[in-house]
Image (cartoon, rainbow, N blue to C red):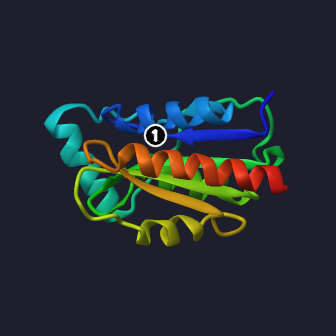
Amino acid sequence: MSDVLCLYYSRTGKTKEAMESIAEALGAEIVAVTDGMDRSGFKGYMRSGMDAMRKGTRNLEPFTTEKDLEDYRLVIVGTPIWAGRMSSPIRGLLKRRGLEMTRVAYVVTRDSDTRYEDIYRQMDQYTASPHTHAVSLRMSSVGYDFWRDRFIQDVKHELEQL
């Protein structure tokens, strides 16, 4: 049973890919969350952007973890960037369960050159304490592997210190 949990939402599979590699490197449990909304195709893309801009959320589909969220030494939350904001399913997760996460780190995935580091503060509004680590990854960028691996090393170092 792992002391680290990776929770994520992925519409296109990019965030899933990033979180799977991070979870594998950390020996972490990994769980996908969804709000059950069909977000596929162009209509889903537009719906997702509008939901993010309105900061709307829906109830999440039930998901299970090996432990209660507050019992993990670290919860890593992964989200794609939609219209300059975190995804609606992750906003919904944090609004409803964020206070159960005592130590958090963030992984955001993006398609643009903008790093969107202000998203971290948005996410911190819903958690029990501010994030300890965060990374903004662009899948097609030259620096993707470097920044992902640095995030993993920073998290490993933190866990060794706890």
Q: Is residue 91 above or below residue 22?
A: below
Q: 55 or 72: nearer the eye?
A: 72
Image-based side of 10 in relation to 126, left or right: left
Q: Residue furthest left?
A: 42
Residue 55 in sight in this render:
yes
Callout 1 amino acid: Tyr
Q: Is residue 100 above or below residue 129?
A: above
Residue 62 in sight in this render:
no
Q: Name the element at disc 1.
A: loop
Q: Position of residue 155 (x, y in %)?
A: 66, 51
Q: Quadrant of residue 11?
A: top left
Q: Position of residue 7 (x, y in %)?
A: 58, 40
Q: Quadrant of the C terminus?
A: bottom right
Q: 136 or 81: nearer the eye?
A: 136
Q: Position of residue 69 (x, y in %)?
A: 75, 45
Q: Quadrant of the N terminus?
A: top right
Counting other residues with Cα less than 10 Å from the Cα at mark 1, is it few (<14), some (14-19), or many (20 or more)?
Answer: many
Q: 23 or 66: nearer the eye?
A: 23
Q: Position of residue 38 (x, y in %)?
A: 31, 32
Q: Is residue 116 above or below residue 67?
A: below
Image-based side of 41 in relation to 144, left or right: left
Tag 1 residue: 9
| Picture residue at 25% right of the left edge, 31% below the top | 40
| Picture residue at 41% right of the left edge, 43% below the top | 145
| Picture residue at 60% right of the left edge, 60% below the top | 133
Image-based side of 52 in relation to 47, left or right: right
